Image (cartoon, coloured by chain):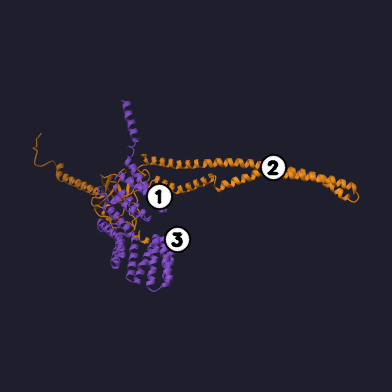
Chain colours: A purple, B orange
Amino acid sequence: MKRLVSSVALLLIASGCAGPPARSSAAARHEAAIEANRRGEAYVRRGELENAARSYREALRLSQSLEDPDGIAANAVNLSIVRQRQGRFAEARSSLDAVLEQPQLRFAPSRLAEASLRHALVDLDEGRFGPAGTWLARSSEYCAGRCALSAAIHNTGAQLALKAGRADEAAAAARAAHDAARAAGDRSELANALRLLGISSLHRGDAAAARTHLEQALALDRELGAPRKIALDLLALGRAAALAGEPGAARAYYARALAVSEAARDGTGAAEARAMLDAAAGK
Amino acid sequence: MSDKPIDKSFPPRRFRGIRSQVNLFLLTAFIGFAGLLGIVAYKQGMFVQHTNVYFRAPDATGINKGTAVRLHGVPVGSVRDIQFAERGVRVRMAINSEYVSRLPRGAQARLAREGYVGAASIHILPGTPATDRTPVTEGDEIRFVAQKGVADMLDEVRQSLTPAFVELRKAAAELADPASDFRKSVSALRAAVEELPPATRELRQLVREADRTVTTLGRQAEGVGARAEAALDVVARVGAQTERELPRFSAKLAGTLDSLDAAAIQVRETTRANGEALRELLAQAPELMRGGNELVRDTQELTDAARRSWLLRDYVEPSAMGTLPVDSFETFGKR
């Protein structure tokens, strides 16, 4: 009897030391996907876009192997952003097919809105304004006017309207984006909306209003530390100064935009600033 | 003895009013019990209005019914229910409606513990200004993020160190490359040192010939002195003196050159030994680098294993999948 009691006690103590079974292969793959995603993020921070794309592709593959809708959507969107920054638009679009062309998987409406908006931005970047409008409308439907992307959707609509030369429509969209961004506390999209309001005012010939909006956008972009957008604000401010009949001030803004773009190693921005500077100098 | 009849319509004096006393006692007990129930219910928050908010987690380890929900460390609710959902669990939190206005939709839930052995609780992170700031409502779902683990931090360190290792490997490869500037310089130095002994030998030969010439000249001068002793006495003395001093000087010079030769041999030996040591070091450098890489990999595997162990697993969870911010001006700068 004593031996039986001792055995039971020993068994109880041993069972206390026992752990649950090892983690499943699915959990390991999920962790590997997260690791690859984090590597991609680190590469993006360092500006190593090709390595970032490789990491995000791996994370996307692992998420697809688990049919993890959230992981698939996150990595597809990340991959499309990286490919767009590389100028590889076809690949940027095809990476989004993992979300937009998969009816058998159930993605959250916010994820579908995000992927559709990314598609619209890639199309807009490539000058395909028709498809960009279609994808933007689809994104707006998924968002249903009440999601974190509302401001970005309105801002993209404003850019499309500007491309089509509809300054009033662009201003209305930018104003809606401004309200949505302010309500959501999204300073990046707030700055974008202010910049678009400024550019719309420029198109309408209102230099004073343009300056007001652009200076607010510039202040926000400085706080956010976005050199490319600072350069865009300065270029637009230069155009506003030129419109107000102040060529000296305009040249000063263009020179500042050039300095910012060169310091940020933004070749496209520097070329644009240099062209504006040359045009202002009458070369 | 007279038997007095007992009047049964009246109870004994000591039981008079017992009914009202019992009723009073029962009423007091009932009121006390009801009050106690009321206090317990109040403490349990039954009179407080709650809002149900949900989150999904891949793993419910450490989360139980009744687990406290905290916002900035202040208890604002508790976990009410845990249900199985697709690839994980769906957790229902009952949040005190008084605090709901401080809980934006972009908030995130995180499982945390008070120390390594403390009780688990759900911490609500209010999110960043870039996230949705509108307050949550009944039935809303917020995101769940796991705590950053030791392996994540080690991975960051590894990512920071990798470029340094790559640079070190490049430097080692350059040192090992026969066509590199360093190896060329060493080869040129060795060639220069190897050319030193022949030069020394030629110099010694030259000195010997000079010695012989001077001796001959001395003898000739002696002959001429015999014929013109008177006129060239001084010259003869000088010649003799020169004849005496020069061999000594030549011997000294030869000794010096011998020492120089020995030193050159020693330098050559030392250089050869150093060269071999350097070559060995260069040969070992790639192996060392491989060892370093393996050490990093082993450390990572050890960390992964430790992370999977039952003792640490509850505290070290993988991070959530990150999404780059979607910027509506991603395109505008590339016109």
Rendered location of residue A206, percent (x, y): 33, 71
Q: Is residue B152 left or right of residue A5?
A: right
Residue A115's disc number: none
Residue that label 2 marks: B261
Residue that label 1 marks: A51
Name the amino acid, label 3: Ala
Mark 3 surroundings within 10 Å by alpha-carbon count, few (fewer than 14), some (14 through 19), many (20 or more) = few
Closer-to-camera residue (B247/B58): B247
Distance of label 1 from label 3 (alpha carbons): 24 Å
**The N terminus of chain A lies in which quarter of the figure?**
top left
Label 3 in the same subunit as label 2: no
Distance of label 2 from label 1 (alpha carbons): 59 Å
Closer-to-camera residue (B94/A117): A117
Q: Is residue B182 left or right of residue B328?
A: right
Relative height, residue B25 to residue A178 (above, below): above
Chain letter for the residue marked with disc 2 in the picture? B
Rendered location of residue B33, percent (x, y): 21, 46
Judged from the image, the secondary structure of the residue bearing numbered disc 1 is: helix
Name the amino acid, label 2: Asp
Mark 1 surroundings within 10 Å by alpha-carbon count, few (fewer than 14), some (14 through 19), many (20 or more) = some
Which comes before the other along the chain, label 1 or label 3? 1
Farthest residue in the bottom direction?
Answer: A245
Question: Are circles 3 and 2 on residues that touch, CB within 8 Å?
Answer: no
Judged from the image, the secondary structure of the residue bearing numbered disc 3 is: helix
Relative height, residue A269 to residue B75 (above, below): below
Q: Is residue A270 left or right of residue B5?
A: right
Residue that label 3 marks: A263
Label 1 in the same subunit as label 3: yes
